[in-house]
Image (cartoon, rainbow, N blue to C red):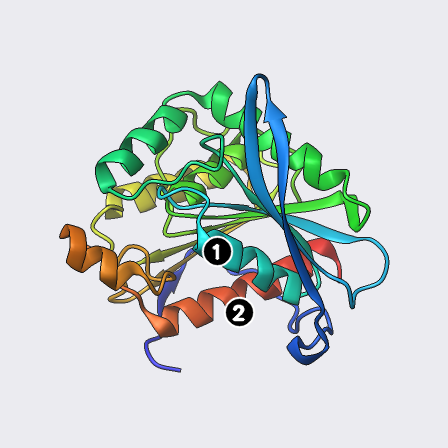
Amino acid sequence: MGRIRSFVLVAVALAGGLLGVSTADAAIRGKVVEYRDGEVTMKGYLAWNDAVKGKRPGVLVVHEWWGLNDYARKRARMLAELGYTALAVDMYGGGKEALHPDDAGAFSSAVMKNMDLMAARFRAAMDLLGKQPTVDAGRIGAIGYCFGGAVVLNMARQGLDLKGVASFHGNLATAKPAEPGAVKAKVMAFNGGADTFITPEQVGAFAAEMARAGADFRFISYTGAKHSFTNPDADAYARKFGLPLAYDAAADRDSWDEMSRFFRRVFGR
């Protein structure tokens, strides 16, 4: 499959397989959904599979610092292909997207520096997802990319009632480390070994924090992979803005497969 993962901090037994719904059988549906955080209208994207009958787990997708764009919507539809109902979350409000790193940094910083705002917007999306007729509200998980990876990790730290969270090239640092016993969700974090935004010290601190909290967690690092390794647009962003990003097809495939097995385990299907 190409480059192998360089290390795993905590070994977890994973059940194989997806949800038994092939892409050929999939009847994927998607729509824009509006919900509110106080006075702010949020514009998310809901995706589900009509070939799956009855209620099924729901998964929140938190976007990169660019905002809720086609990439986040694509991941929601990919989760629907696995048999879940997925909601691509709007963390900025109004479906706002950034076209330049300066704007993306400003939008993401406004949320990252206000944990109450972050939690309120995430909870609003979680509440909407749980109310969908196709969703078992007792089985909700979350994934996030870059900025979104940091968001889902912070929501796990705060003890939200999530079955599992998976962070892809997300920031591991936090202003509010998890307290012992606080983390209810099982946690997976995927990072690139050549990601210059994530230092070895941050990786070590994250592992120590999760261990102190008594969390069920697993960390996978992909040797040579850079930041945004899951996003095929990363190379274009790197060229256009001079950012240390790069797509890595092997790491993208492997991390998605690992995430799929992870959710099968935590959801019990």
In this view of the protein, which residue sits in the foreground, 18 or 214?
18
In this view of the protein, which residue sits in the foreground, 262 or 117?
117
Q: Quadrant of the N terminus?
A: bottom left
The image's mark for residue 82 is none
The image's mark for residue 10 is 1
Q: Residue at x 36, y 22 (%)?
A: 113
Q: Residue at x 28, y 67 (%)?
A: 223
The residue that mark 2 highlights is 257
Position of residue 262 relative to residue 206, above or below, is below
In this view of the protein, which residue sits in the foreground, 76 or 136?
76
Q: Is residue 179 left or right of residue 1?
A: right
Question: Which amino acid, by three-letter code, is at mark 1?
Answer: Val
- Density class for disc 2 (Cα within 10 Å; few <14, some 14-19, many ≥20) is some
Q: Residue at x 32, y 46 (%)?
A: 203
Q: Position of residue 38 (x, y in %)?
A: 59, 17
Q: Position of residue 63 (x, y in %)?
A: 45, 45
- Density class for disc 1 (Cα within 10 Å; few <14, some 14-19, many ≥20) is few
- Tag 1, which secondary structure? loop
Q: Quadrant of residue 105?
A: top left
Q: Is residue 82 left or right of residue 179?
A: right
Q: Residue at x 25, y 54 (%)?
A: 195
- Tag 2, which secondary structure? helix
Q: Quadrant of the C terminus?
A: bottom right
Q: Is residue 194 visible?
A: no
Q: Is residue 11 left or right of residue 83?
A: left
Q: Position of residue 137 (x, y in %)?
A: 77, 41
Q: Position of residue 165 (x, y in %)?
A: 56, 47
Q: Is residue 197 visible?
A: yes
Position of residue 134 relative to residue 122, above or below, is below
Question: Which amino acid, by three-letter code, is at mark 2?
Answer: Asp
Disc nearer the start of the sequence (2/1): 1
From the image, state whether disc 2 or disc 1 is nearer to you.
2
